[in-house]
Image: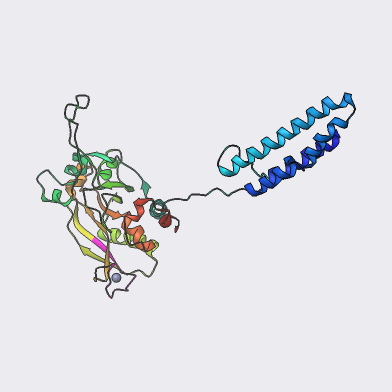
């Protein structure tokens, strides 16, 4: 009889573990614990056993009954709360593949830009995001009263009132451009210099599909003996062809920036409309891509470079805008929302 009891227990245990819903558990309850079940029958027959066997067998039968009952109860709770600790796990099922992440489209694009310039002999440098006004404006030929300071809505930083632990000696701000990195880099370098400085910049702007208060720029600086405008146009044309393809049409036109002389803007023919005019290019047929120019002699002097011996060019490009154009993204805000429907497309 003991063997019979044990085999009933083994069979019940397997069935209870495999039960997929509470209805099946109810059926198993009746099958193993009901009045007509095999177990109940065996329990009834214990009184017919020889006296010396009754106690031990009765004990075993009762323990098995309790084990089956508590097994069913535990499974029932597990089914009610599928995340509960008591849920039985089927270890034979194949596992769930964990979701794999990937780089943000902007990170990928910044790395592409870096690799293009590194292949042309540039080094990649970085600078602080909280900057001294001196580096962000003054040494870039934008003095306090210069009208060009109106070009940027700047986040200035000052110590909170009553904060005595922070003594502010110089005007601090969140950098509005990556250009101050030029000045900082040149404090530690001597020409010839070829560098780019990608990084975050901040402007107090209302956001819309093409403006954000935080975005990415990339600054470039080349200083050497006899650097000419043609070197500038050649270098940046190669860069734009590597990003937008060999057939991209490039246009260069004069523009004013206080830290260069002359200043040049680079446009590319709108690839969506082929120059016919569309909403992306504001019906102009051309898209403004980057600003550049030959470094102003005053800025060279501020960098400690002898402008009689050396000349150079500098450029600044909006990485967000370039990434959007090369990927066909229409709203800059998508980059910063963290929306997986957008990010999964890259
Ligand atoms: Zn267009």
Task: Please tell me whether residue 269 belongs to the stretch shown in magenta.
Answer: yes
Locate residue 309 relative to residue 240 in the image: left or right.
left
The outermost residue toward the right is 50
Q: Is residue 52 above or below residue 170?
A: above
Q: Which colour scheme is used?
A: rainbow
Secondary structure mostly seen in the magenta stretch: loop
Q: Residue at x 77, y 42 (%)?
A: 37
Residue sitting farthest toward the left? 145
Residue 320, by quadrant, is bottom left
Quadrant location of the N terminus in the rendered image: top right
Q: In this view, does 42 lie to the left or right of 181?
A: right
Above or below 253: residue 201 = above
> For the C terminus, which image quadrant?
bottom left
Instruction: Look at the image and give the residue range highlighted in magenta.
Output: 265-280
Between 316 and 151, which is closer to the camera in this rendering?
A: 151
Residue at image coords 25%, 53%: 207
Task: Using the rendered image of the protein, determine whether residue 178 is visible from the camera's viewpoint.
Answer: no
Image coords of residue 240 (percent x, y): 35, 62
Return the residue nearer the eye: 259 or 210. 210
Q: Residue at 74% of width from left, 34% of height from top? A: 65
Q: Dividing the picture into quarters, in which one does residue 58 lie?
A: top right
**Place of residue 314 in the rendered image (x, y in percent of width and height, measured from the top left):** 26, 52
- Relative depth, front residue between 276 and 148: 276
Residue occupying the point 52% across, 49% down = 100
In-image side of 243 versus 215 (left or right): right
**Residue 89 visible in image:** yes
Q: Considering depth in this image, is 156 or 228 the residue closer to the camera? A: 156
- Give the number of callouts: 0
Residue 201 position in % (x across, y down):
27, 47
């Amino acid at each position: 009889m003991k063997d019979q009891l044990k085999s009933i227990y083994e069979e019940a245990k397997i069935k209870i573990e495999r039960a997929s819903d509470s209805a099946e558990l109810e059926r198993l309850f009746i099958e193993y614990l009901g009045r007509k079940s095999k177990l109940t029958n065996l329990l009834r027959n214990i009184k017919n056993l020889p006296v010396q066997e009754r106690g031990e067998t009765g004990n075993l039968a009762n323990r098995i009954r309790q084990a089956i009952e508590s097994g069913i109860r535990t499974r029932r709770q597990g089914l009610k709360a599928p995340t509960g600790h008591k849920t039985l796990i089927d270890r034979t099922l194949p596992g769930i593949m964990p979701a794999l992440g990937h780089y943000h489209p902007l990170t990928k694009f910044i790395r592409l830009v870096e690799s293009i310039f590194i292949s042309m002999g540039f080094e990649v440098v970085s600078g602080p995001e909280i900057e001294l006004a001196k580096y962000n404006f003054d040494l870039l030929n934008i003095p306090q009263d210069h009208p060009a300071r109106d070009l940027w809505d700047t986040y200035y930083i000052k110590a909170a009132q009553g904060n005595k632990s922070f003594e502010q000696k110089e005007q601090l701000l969140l950098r509005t451009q990556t250009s101050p990195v030029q000045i900082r880099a040149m404090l530690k370098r001597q020409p010839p210099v070829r560098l780019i400085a990608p990084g975050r910049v901040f402007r107090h702007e209302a956001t819309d599909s093409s403006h954000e208060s935080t975005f990415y720029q990339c600054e470039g600086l080349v200083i050497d003996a006899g650097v000419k405008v043609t070197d500038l146009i050649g270098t940046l044309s190669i860069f734009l062809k590597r990003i937008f393809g060999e057939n991209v049409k490039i246009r260069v036109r004069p523009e004013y920036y206080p830290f260069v002389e002359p200043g040049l803007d680079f446009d590319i023919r709108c690839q969506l409309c082929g120059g016919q005019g569309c909403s992306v290019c504001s019906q102009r047929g051309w898209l403004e891509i980057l600003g550049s120019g030959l470094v102003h002699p005053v800025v060279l002097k501020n960098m400690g470079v002898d402008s009689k011996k050396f000349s150079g060019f500098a450029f600044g490009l909006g990485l967000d805008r370039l990434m959007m154009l090369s990927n066909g993204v229409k709203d800059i805000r998508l980059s910063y929302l963290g929306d997986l429907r957008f990010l999964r497309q890259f």
